[in-house]
């Protein structure tokens, strides 16, 4: 029997088969695939009911061209490339993957922090260069009894805090949207402002979305306020940190080092001067990409799309929750 009221889902970019299978198992759902490199994508959405996207800018023009659209599901938790205001004006929820990528991003933040603290890249290079004497440099530092400042206490930041505590770190938290008693209940110390907290921190890790409030929240003044022995880790969005200011701070030794998974421009230019520094550890925006995490994110994305169709969308995964009360 032919399904009636078929919903059309456009998947922009490649997703794990786990989510693909969920969508294709539904007789009332038709799935089409689109390349994020297609410059004419906005002209192909007239009959689309749901969009599932990896990394692609969803702007007002595309939204206006999709009169049937009822859900946009992001394969991740960041949404700075999506016109949230335009979706909200249409009453369309933007859903993210919730807890799906939190464990692996938190682990990656600790990987970067540890690699900077323990001089992982330098030690590996010394061994390959037959420089056994490098062990006498005393370049590594311990995490125990050090102060970790966690900026952003959401799904990922809370996990990073727990991991830091497992290493015996004193964890301080800056998040104006989380009550102090909730931070204290997690065994952490709330701080009210970035300025006074930075000079006390040995390590700073960023877990905020990128928006007008957070763009370049760590710039030249903030980097100058940090200890010269401190390190900065960013697995959130490149624009949260002023990249030229960070480059200058790393070059001048104003801070010990940095671990970066995200950049102002992605992919970065091959001649990005950060690549020539020894006191920065880099990864290609891969914090949320593991075999296990790709399965979870793909399935959660598909469930978000189907939930919007069925009236069972998990509100915890919706960014613009105000559209749910209007329904």
Image (cartoon, grey):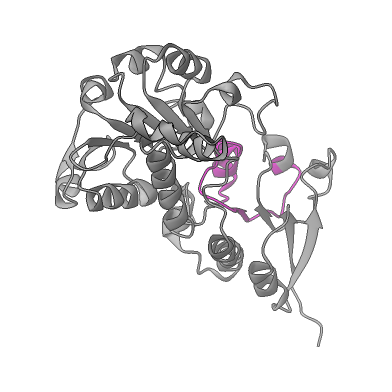
Number of callouts: 0
Check residue 200 for magenta coloring: no
Q: Is residue 236 left or right of residue 155?
A: right
Q: Nearer the viewer, residue 235 or 130?
A: 130
Whether residue 6 is visible? no
Percent position (x, y) of residue 152? 34, 39
Residue located at (47% from left, 12% from top): 248
126 lies above or below 245? below
Residue located at (76% from left, 45% from top): 36
Percent position (x, y) of residue 301? 58, 61
321 lies above or below 8? above
Q: Quadrant of the N terminus?
A: bottom right
First to last magenta residue range: 63-92
Percent position (x, y) of residue 63? 69, 43
Percent position (x, y) of residue 142? 27, 39
Q: Is residue 223 left or right of residue 164?
A: right
Q: Nearer the viewer, residue 141 or 128?
A: 128
278 lies above or below 25? above
Quadrant location of residue 115? top left
Residue located at (73% from left, 36% from top): 61
Check residue 83 for magenta coloring: yes
């Amino acid at each position: 029997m032919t399904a009636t009221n078929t919903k059309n889902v456009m998947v922009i970019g490649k997703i794990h088969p786990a989510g693909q299978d969920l969508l294709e198992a539904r007789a009332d759902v038709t799935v089409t695939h689109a390349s994020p490199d297609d410059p004419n994508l906005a002209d192909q959405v007239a009959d689309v009911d749901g969009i599932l996207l990896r990394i692609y800018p969803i702007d007002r023009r595309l939204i206006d061209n999709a009169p049937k659209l009822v859900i946009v599901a992001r394969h991740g938790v960041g949404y700075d490339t999506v016109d949230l205001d335009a979706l909200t004006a249409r009453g369309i929820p933007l859903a993210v993957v919730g807890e799906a990528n939190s464990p692996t991003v938190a682990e990656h933040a600790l990987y970067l922090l540890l690699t900077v603290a323990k001089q992982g890249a330098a030690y590996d290079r010394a061994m390959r260069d037959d420089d056994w004497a490098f062990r006498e440099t005393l370049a590594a530092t311990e995490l125990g009894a050090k102060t970790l400042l966690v900026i952003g206490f959401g799904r990922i930041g809370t996990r990073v805090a727990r991991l830091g505590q497992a290493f015996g770190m004193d964890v301080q938290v800056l998040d104006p949207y989380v009550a102090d008693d909730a931070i204290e209940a997690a065994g952490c110390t709330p701080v009210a402002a970035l300025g006074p907290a930075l000079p006390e921190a040995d390590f700073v890790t960023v877990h905020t979305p990128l928006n007008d409030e957070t763009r370049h929240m760590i710039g030249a003044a903030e980097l100058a306020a940090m200890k010269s022995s401190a390190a900065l880790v960013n697995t959130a969005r490149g624009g949260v940190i002023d990249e030229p200011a960070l480059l200058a701070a790393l070059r001048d030794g104003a801070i010990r080092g940095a671990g970066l998974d995200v950049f102002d421009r992605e992919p970065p230019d091959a001649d990005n001067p950060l690549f020539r520094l020894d006191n920065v550890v880099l990864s290609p925006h891969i914090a949320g990409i593991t075999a296990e995490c790709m399965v979870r994110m793909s399935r959660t994305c598909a469930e978000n799309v189907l939930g919007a169709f069925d009236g069972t969308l998990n509100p915890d995964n919706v960014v613009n929750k105000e559209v749910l009360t209007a329904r």
